């Protein structure tokens, strides 16, 4: 808790550093590169198995994600699986509907001893604990962010430390946590899922595509959260580029039936009707990831 709040407070040091546009570019690089590391490795790879990549690529992206200072990859992805299994119900580690805004946004991450450890039967822990480099990053998750902070200071002194580590670590933390709170409270709902997930363009920008949360809750296995070309999803662009050069394969796409469901729901909204249980396109609200991992 002390480390977390110290980092949050350290972002205020931007007011003590002379402003320069190159420092803004440094903030953006540090924020968005680590955001992609989180969502590409921690989220779409470890938690949802939406694509495959080789061991070196996996380590590099996991290292980048761990440098975000949001604990370790197994801890992060394992809790995310639990979020989907119990979304907005008892058992969800971070639901504003169940536990309130503060607890869902930050409290669960800092204060609750229930979330310090994951059960050995958790699918992420079970399936990836055999990779020693991933276990090391999970156990010593303080090392990558500390190394990044030192590197920034050595490269550019206080301005680089503040704009390249302190500020972007704070903004990235809240961009990630906002998916648990803002995206279950504000935004649009393309799909009638049984949770309160919503799509939000603002969080999609700052969380590297994660803000298309209602899309994601409807079909979790997809490697893209922005289901349409106009839905900004830089993590998907990176995965697609990796596939083009052979660094990613078995990339899971959005099935045609999900697009058809979206078209049908849009048509119902256009006519002013609310689709009922009987006449709606079957939602098939299965938790695809949890079922496939558990089987």
Image (cartoon, helix red, strand yellow):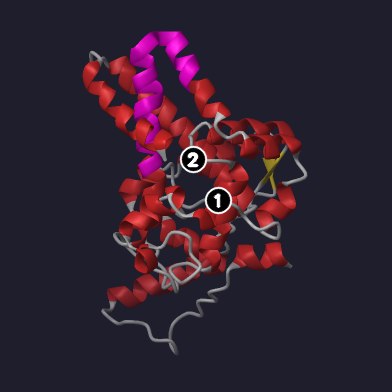
List x then y, in percent, for residue 14. 26, 22
Main secondary structure type of the part rendered in magenta: helix
Vertical placement of residue 122 versus 165, above or below: below
Q: Quick check: 138 left or right of 17? A: right
Number of residues whose C-alpha sits closer than 10 Å to that of mark 2, classed few (under 14), some (14–19) or many (20 or more)? many
Q: What element carries label 1?
A: loop
Tell me the quarter of the picture where residue 16 sits: top left
Q: Which of marks 2 and 1 is in front?
A: 1
Vertical placement of residue 229 versus 90, above or below: above
Q: Specify whether residue 230 is in view.
A: no
**On residue 70, which mark appears?**
2
Q: What element carries label 2?
A: loop
243 or 153, which lies in front?
A: 153
Decide which of tag 2 and tag 1 comes sooner along the chain.
Answer: 2
Instruction: State which region is magenta.
Output: 149-174
Label pair 2/1, CB-CB below 8 angstroms: no
Name which residue lies at 32% across and 82% down: 274
Instruction: Name the quadrant of the N terminus.
Output: top left
Name which residue lies at 67% across and 36% down: 58
List x then y, in percent, for residue 106. 38, 49
List x then y, in percent, for residue 139. 64, 38
Q: Does the magenta stretch include residue 147?
A: no
**On residue 116, which mark appears?**
1
Instruction: Name the quadrant of the C terminus.
Output: bottom right
List x then y, in percent, for residue 195. 43, 70
């Amino acid at each position: 808790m002390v480390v977390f709040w110290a980092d949050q407070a350290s972002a205020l040091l931007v007011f003590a550093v002379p402003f320069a546009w190159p420092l803004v570019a440094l903030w953006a690089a540090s924020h968005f590169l680590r955001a992609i590391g989180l969502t590409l490795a921690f989220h779409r790879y470890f938690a949802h198995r939406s694509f495959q990549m080789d061991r070196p690529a996996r380590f590099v992206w996991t290292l980048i994600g761990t440098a975000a200072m949001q604990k370790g990859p197994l801890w992060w992805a394992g809790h995310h699986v639990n979020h989907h299994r119990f979304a907005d119900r008892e058992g969800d580690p971070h639901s504003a509907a169940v536990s309130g805004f503060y607890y869902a946004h930050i409290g669960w991450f800092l204060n609750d001893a229930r979330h310090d450890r994951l059960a050995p039967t958790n699918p992420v822990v079970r399936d990836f604990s055999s990779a020693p480099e991933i276990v090391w990053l999970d156990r010593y998750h303080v090392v990558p962010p500390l190394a990044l902070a030192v590197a920034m200071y050595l490269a550019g002194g206080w301005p680089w430390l503040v704009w390249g580590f302190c500020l972007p670590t704070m903004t990235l933390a809240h961009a990630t946590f906002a998916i648990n709170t803002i995206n279950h409270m504000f935004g649009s709902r393309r799909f009638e899922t049984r949770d309160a997930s919503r799509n939000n363009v603002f969080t999609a920008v700052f969380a590297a595509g994660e803000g298309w949360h209602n899309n994601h809750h409807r079909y979790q296995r997809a490697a893209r959260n922005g289901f349409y070309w106009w839905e900004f999803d830089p993590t998907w662009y990176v995965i697609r580029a990796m596939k083009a050069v052979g660094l990613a394969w078995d990339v899971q796409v959005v099935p045609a039936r999900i697009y058809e469901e979206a078209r049908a729901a849009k048509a119902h909204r256009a006519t002013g009707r609310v689709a009922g249980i009987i006449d709606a396109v079957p939602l098939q609200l299965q938790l695809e990831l949890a079922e496939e991992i558990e089987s």
